[in-house]
Amino acid sequence: MIIICQRLLKNTKISGITLFPFILLRKSEYRQNSTLINHERIHIRQQLELLVVPFYIWYLTEYYLRYLKYKNPDLAYRNISFEREAYANEHNPDYLMSRKFWSFFKYI
């Protein structure tokens, strides 16, 4: 995992984004935010499980299906199975040690 503070996110609402193997953060002080880093590390594990490219295809497909359902971009994002797993477990620093393979399926 490589953490980069990125100017590309400067004028967005995005605090962090994972583009395997990188975690991009809007502000350098977010490096100290263990909850955010854990959330993004969960995404790294998800990406590895799906061999990276299929993860992005699934992620975008699920986002658009949720968007069609909810007609709200934030609600669509929050209901993507990968995000639901990451948000549900971001406060547990030990989650990745006990996480089972393809655990995001529980959140579909």
Image: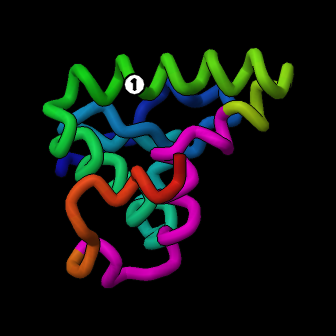
Is label 1 in a helix, a strand or a loop?
helix
For the view shown, which residue lies furthest in the right direction? Answer: 71
Badge 1 is on which residue? 58
Between 69 and 90, the one nearer to me in the picture: 69
Which quadrant would residue 103 be assigned to in this image?
bottom left
Q: At 52% from the left edge and 77% from the top edge, which residue is drawn?
A: 91
Task: Give the image location of residue 5, x and y in percent.
Answer: 39, 41
Magenta portion: prevailing SS class: helix
Span of residues in magenta: 77-96
Task: Give the image location of residue 28, x and y in percent.
Answer: 45, 51
87 lies left or right of 56: right
Q: Quick check: 34 above or below 74?
A: below
Q: Amino acid at mark 1?
A: Trp
Q: Residues within 10 Å of mark 1 (few under 14, many from 20)?
A: some
| Residue 28 seen anywhere in this rendered image of the structure | yes
Residue 95 inside the magenta-drawn segment? yes
Which quadrant would residue 38 be assigned to in this image?
bottom left
Q: At 33% from the left edge and 43% from the top edge, which residue is drawn?
A: 23
Residue 94 inside the magenta-drawn segment? yes
